[in-house]
Structure formats: structure tokens, C-alpha cells
Amino acid sequence: MPVRHFGLVVRWEVWQGLADRLHAKGVHFLIQPHVRFQGKPGEQATFFIEDPSGNALEFKAFQDPARLFARG
């Protein structure tokens, strides 16, 4: 996402539960929950929302948390 944002990394199951709760409450997603790099070392789940002040927030989870800063 080419916009300034604050990001938070959580455990995979926490991310899924949060995405489900936000969907159920009708929260608008700037970028819908989805999994990137599926099946690859950097596999990650991500979504973006806005806070009440209009700041972009990214919530992300990794299948392998040790790969957080891995490249390739």
C-alpha cells in the first residue's frame, strides 16, 4: 500500500478473528482481508482499515512469525 500507515502484526488466529468481527460489524476495509504469497516463505494475511481520524491501519499475520523481516 503506497500510503503512510501504522501496522500491527498479530498471531494468525487473532488476525482471522479480528477480520471476521470487523466484517460482521460492517466496517469498511480499505483493502479487504486476504493472504499474500500463499505457500511461500513470506506467506502473510493482511487487511487495511481507517481509524476515526482517517489514518490507515494495517493488520497483518504471518504463518511463520520468524519470517517477519525475511526477504524472498
Image (cartoon, rainbow, N blue to C red):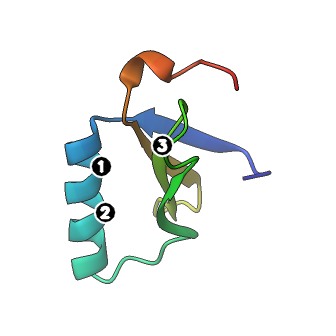
Query: Which disc, if any, is residue 19?
Result: 2
Identity, as a three-letter code, of the amino acid under mark 1: Trp
Q: Residue at x 32, y 83 (%)?
A: 26
Q: With respect to residue 68, does 59 lie above or below?
A: below
Question: Left or right: 40 with respect to 21?
Answer: right
Regarding mark 2 in the picture, which secondary structure is present there?
A: helix
Identity, as a three-letter code, of the amino acid under mark 3: Gln
x then y, percent, for residue 63: 36, 35
Q: Residue at x 24, y 68 (%)?
A: 20
- Mark closer to the chain start, 3 or 1: 1
x then y, percent, for residue 6: 56, 39
What residue would you read off at disc 3?
44
Question: Left or right: 15 with respect to 32?
Answer: left
Q: With respect to residue 34, does 26 lie above or below?
A: below
What is the spatial separation of the Cα atoms under label 3 and label 2, in whole angstroms?
14 Å
Q: Are marks 3 and 1 in contact (CB under 8 Å)?
A: no
Q: Residues within 10 Å of mark 1 (few under 14, many from 20)?
A: many
Q: Are marks 1 and 2 in contact (CB under 8 Å)?
A: yes
x then y, percent, for residue 1: 72, 53
Identity, as a three-letter code, of the amino acid under mark 2: Ala
Query: Which disc, if any, is residue 23?
Result: none
What residue would you read off at disc 1?
15
Of 8 and 14, nearer the camera is 14
x then y, percent, for residue 36: 56, 51
- Mark closer to the chain start, 3 or 2: 2
Residue with the most extreme front position: 39
Instruction: Nearest to the eye among marks 3 and 2: give it.
Output: 3
